[in-house]
Amino acid sequence: MDIKLEPVRDPKDLHTQIFINNEFVDSVSGRHFPTINPVTGKTFCDVSEGDKSIVTLEMGKPFLQAFYETMWSAAILRYYAGFADKVGGKTIPVDGDHFCYTRHEPVGVCGHIIPWNYPVSMFTWKVGPALACGCTAVVKPAEQTPLAALHLAALCKEVGFPPGVVNVVPGYGPTAGAALTAHPDVDKVAFTGSTEVGKLILQASGATNIKRTSLELGGKSPNVIMDDADLDMAVRFAHEAVMENAGQCCMAGSRTFVHEKIYDQFVAKSRELAKERLSMTGDPFDLKTKQGPQVDEDQYKKILEMIESGKKDGAKLESGGAAVGGDGYFIQPTVFSGVTDNMRIAKEEIFGPVQQIFKFKTLDEAIERANSSQYGLGAAIFTKSIENAMMFTQGIRAGTVWVNLYLILSPQAPFGGFKMSGLGRELGEYSMSLYQEVKTVIMKIPQKNS
Ligand code: NAI
Ligand code: MG
């Protein structure tokens, strides 16, 4: 396939209004909010702000990675398009002279509140299965990244979606987002973002019309490296596991547990990789760039504050540990060794390019420590032993467990969290059940002599 890479750089080429009923319109309030380019820290366009009534530019994601995200998103839509004519119920033999079957009906109007870290794929994870089940969608993109969702809305119209099937309402969380979660005509909310807001969404559901709710929240995912692992491979995967998307990834492998026998070697190699990555940190439109800026000033400040807490708590700084300097929200790829379980950087989600390396002696110990977290999104083990792999995959409390790899997802494979990492499973066939109500029909079977 011949693919042309054409980044949009000019604000004139972007949609900046609310998309309702297949039309771009101004908000009722007439208010706008700024979209800031994280490379410069400056506003480059204003977007209509809904309240109650293109990725590199707005998020700073390196262009090639933004392109891969778009291709992956297309694969997800293709996968769910295949489900649209395969939604069916069951015929169930029941007690008595009765005929019983189920219908899987659309849940109704779905509010999709999505974050800024994967603005295209988060749209498709949610809208894809919703449409395949016959639902309609109102998408509230993150305030940092409204343009990607508005562009997707324009494409929905271009390919002939009927009016009202996909709508996009940009705006802030506590206004536009909260209005969706409280709205009596919204039947379901699917959310990806912080655990803090996930709790608010559950409360809003309970306080209004018991909306069906699915949540994909934070993580502090463990990545366990055994002493029999292929060392170079494990170092590289562990590095990418936490640095991917400048660390702004819910499933980031942000707790790297390394067996004591290979600990020093592992740390030294991880330090080198972080230094190499620093030389590829910069302009996200440069095709050689691996790491762009953090999405906004809030995230940038939070990450730098967490790095300072790591230094204060006595972790050993191996590499990075500061902002890159100059314009924009760039942070040096950072590696800490000697991290212990009680430190803040060991417990809280950093959501930045910061690797924490812990030391362990036995697999049992590693599993216990890996599980002692409020989160349970991803987990991985690197080992050549099938016994270690089996012990780990059974003992760990996480929604996805990788063996000898990390960050691998597929449209067919379900994804979601144990514990405070979420509720429900997205992707795969499992996601379909989030968008359906099951209706049970029981009919009397006429008797011959009655
Ligand atoms: P957030 O959870 O506040 O924002 C995510 C989405 O929720 C956005 O669309 C936002 O407008 C919306 N939102 C915010 N408050 C809301 C409310 N009261 N009602 C309804 N919707 C609301 O996340 P934020 O502030 O961007 O990042 C904070 C932290 O959350 C990050 O540092 C990271 O730790 C975590 N996070 C996790 C993500 C994931 O992929 N699981 C994605 C983004 C953030
Ligand atoms: Mg927030």
Image: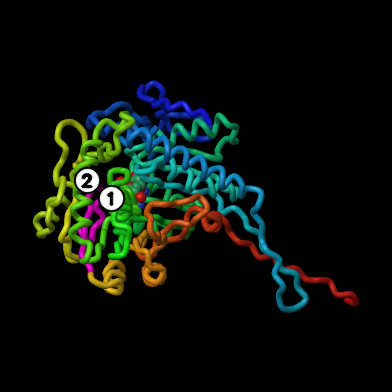
Where is 29 relative to 113, above or below? above
Instruction: Name the foreground residue: 61 vs 120.
Output: 61
Position of 428 with respect to 83 (left or right) is left
Position of 309 with respect to 67 (left or right) is left
Q: Which residue is mark 2?
A: 274
Examine the rendering and report whether any part of residue 57 can be seen: no
Mark 2, Cα crowd under 10 Å, few <14 / some 14-19 / many 20+, is: many
Check residue 298 in the rendering and tell me which mark sits there, or answer none. none
Check residue 239 in the rendering and tell me which mark sits there, or answer none. 1
Residue 358 picture quarter = bottom left
Q: Earlier in the sequence, mark 1 or mark 2?
A: 1
In the rendered image, residue 323, in percent from the top left (x then y), is placed at 16, 40
Q: Amino acid at mark 2?
A: Ala
**Which region of the structure is painted magenta?**
345-360
Mark 1, Cα crowd under 10 Å, few <14 / some 14-19 / many 20+, is: many
In the rendered image, residue 215, in percent from the top left (x then y), is placed at 41, 56
Task: Find out whether residue 58 is within the magenta segment.
Answer: no
